[in-house]
Image (cartoon, rainbow, N blue to C red):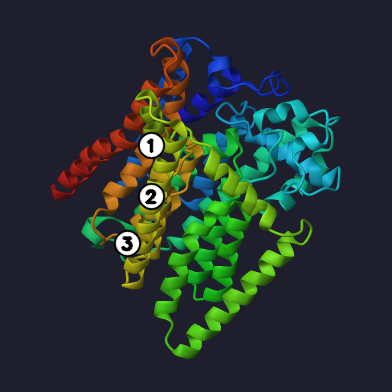
Amino acid sequence: MLSLAGYIVLAFWFPLLPHYNRLPVADVRSLAPSLAGGLAYALLLCLLFTFFAIAYRRVQGGRERVGLLRLAGTSLLFALPLLLVYPINANDLYRYVIRGRINSLYGESPFAVPPDGFPDDPFLPLAGEWAEATSPYGPVWELTAGGITRVGGDNLLLGLLAFKLFGLLAFVGTAILLWLIFTPTTKKGDEAGVDPASSRAANVLLWAWNPALLLIFIVDGHNDALMIFFLLLGFYFMNRGHVALGFLLMMLGPLVKPIGVLALPFFFITVWRTRPSSAARLRFLVLSFFGGIVLVWVTFLPYGSPWQLAQRLLQEAATMASFSPTATLILIGQAMELDLTITFRWVAGIASLLFVCLVLWLLWMTWRGRSAVRGTSDIYFGYLLQALNFRIWYAAWPFPWLLLDSELGKKEPGTAFRLRYGLWFLLTSQLSVILYGHIRVTLLAGSQLFAHILGMILVFVMPFFLARSGVWRDNERLKQP
């Protein structure tokens, strides 16, 4: 009830209805412009995480018996006021509507024609700095967006609410998948005295009641929810022995958002290694390869070649840097009066080389028997460390794999630490908007460099120390009779 009260406060503090068609689009700082307002928002986030942690401890310790219906029902209850909250940390919802209309209203491809190709569209001003950019998403998402905008028509508010509802469905669908994947297979009393049923419910709760994820997927309506849903849907079927079908379902993830492709090689290698015979390996290879080609062909059929999407992604990757460790290095080089073009090229090149080395090492470890789930969480976090761009919703990418690793790989070293780091990482990422907004403007004299340095410490370094402390407390508690 305390958590629900906090979400209701957000609905009254940042209401969607009075602001949904304002220009320019708003954010936390424009709707709560004072430093006191920003700090109050940060305090509310911390309180929501505190209530969330208390609920988790009660369920994990067996003091509360929680089933799927209560977990999903409470998640839906939390989401109701959040549907009426303005997308305070991202304006992607507006671009979902605008690009969906390119297909549904104008009959053009969002991969070929940017929003400003339709200068008379009433929603064009809301595209902001992305008016000249084509879609960076996959065809499955653009087909989905086209269908949603056909329902919304010229009603912007209805379109925004429809995308929020869709994000909610994908989010709750993922919670249900996690519940099914985490089916208890051990008896009460083993695994260091932890009740498997309580562990299952607690880990699903970490997804379904997570304040950061509720803000990302319902308040801001990010399509990452659908990408993650398809990846986990495929994992569910692979876990049930339907490896080819599961892998093809996983392929729908990157066809929603291309970053989903990072997960695929780890599961391909795992399936290849565990097939009982050469004939089974060949059958899996043929089904996944040709099935994947058909899947890509069918989903891109309304839009033409995937090359247009590839060009768009390469352009963005090579020309932009913001809110990331690599962007911080570029700003440091700029402050040292180094040539900006050369600094950008060197930082981007070295980061890419290190990432390629990480990918090869993780794939090699997977080939030698390391968990594909652990490899996937590692590769997503490695990507965040080296990417030129970082956005707070990217913190959600490793999290479902950390949950899977926590529940399915309890005997792996460092599992508790990794999950706790992922939780703190979600919180510190959300808090960073106050640092880059209110604190940068009022206390750092607008300095992007100082804000980035502090931001990297807050977002990437602080969770390490907080997680270390949390693992120590867990270990001490387990030692007690």
- Give whichever of discs 2 and 1 has the lower sequence position: 1
Q: Which mark is residue 325?
A: 1
Q: Is residue 410 left or right of residue 335?
A: left
What's the amino acid at mark 1?
Pro
Q: Is residue 242 left or right of residue 126?
A: left
| Foreground of the two, 457 or 419 | 457
Question: Which label lies toward us, 1 or 3?
Answer: 1
Residue position for label 3: 409
Rendering quarter of residue 255 = bottom right
- Give whichever of discs 3 and 2 has the lower sequence position: 2
Q: Position of residue 181 (x, y in %)?
A: 46, 62
Mark 1 neighbour density, 10 Å: few (under 14) some (14–19) many (20 or more): many
Residue position for label 2: 382
Q: Position of residue 159 (x, y in %)?
A: 75, 36
Q: Answer above or below: position of 447 versus 295.
A: above
Q: Residue at x 53, y 44 (%)?
A: 317
At mark 3, the secondary structure is: loop
Label 1 vs label 3: CA separation? 30 Å
